[in-house]
Amino acid sequence: MRAGALKQRIIIQNISSSSRNEYGEVVPTWMNYAPILGTEQVIDGVFAVAGLTNWTLGAGWADGTGKAAKNANGVGTLTPVVAIPAVIGTVYKIAYKVLDVTVDGVTLTYGGVSDTTRLADGTYTAYITATTTGSLILTPSSNGSRFSIDNTSIKVYPTYVWARVEPLSGRELFQAQQIQASINTRFTIRHITGITPKMRISYDSKNYQIESVINTNEQNREIQLMCSIMST
């Protein structure tokens, strides 16, 4: 992969005839993009717990019943009680909803990077590359700001590498299902650290749960992701 391209780019594919991609690498002609999705980092991002006990409410903030409301004067911030440390250099997809805006707005900051100050109702998505380990902070733009926050989410942005997709059958299927009865597909990719059974793969309009991660021959050259298809 060329310098400056998004790290850990996964392209999951079935092998057929070969051609070259824009980087000059030999790849199959037919391919699908298949992100390995990060898990949700925010606890109670929908603000459903009464009293918003998973959040630290600074001056001016209150429980807005199903949302965090900046409904009084103050320049206090909204932050999670349990910090969500970012990993420097990691790309994150951050989504959040701003509503009830009547005065000024709010700025979301994560991993040392601030999103655009939002001055109107809307559902916003930001892709940021963390420059620090800083946790999530929502800061009103003025003492008199009036707005609410809902549906807040932080996930590691889907990463991509070249991969081989193999539906299991016969003896391989039987052996794999001794580990986990639902395993039916193997994804083989180059060796990458940090992939765990807490992650999943989206491929060909289906989601697969990673049940087992195998470092082939313990050589740190490739890993096999033994997966089961998810019902939703």
Image (cartoon, rainbow, N blue to C red):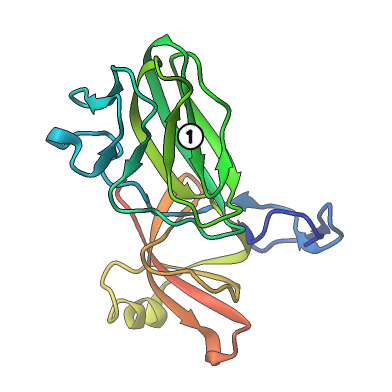
Front position in the image: 130 or 10:
130
Which image quadrant: the C terminus?
A: top left
Residue wearing tag 1: 108
Q: Name the side, left or right, on which 178 lies relative to 161.
A: left
Q: Give the farthest residue toward the left.
A: 50
Q: Name the side, left or right, on which 142 lies relative to 11.
A: left
Give the residue displayed 58% in from the left and 59% down from the top.
88
Observer able to see residue 37: yes
Give the residue displayed 34% in from the left and 32% down from the top.
151
Q: Give the farthest residue toward the right.
A: 24
- Which amino acid, mark 1? Leu
Q: Secondary structure under badge 1?
A: strand
Picture coordinates of residue 21, whole percent (x, y) = 81, 54
Picture coordinates of residue 5, whole percent (x, y) = 75, 54
Give the residue displayed 40% in from the left and 22% down from the top.
98
Picture coordinates of residue 77, whole percent (x, y) = 38, 34
Q: Is residue 211 above or below residue 44?
A: below
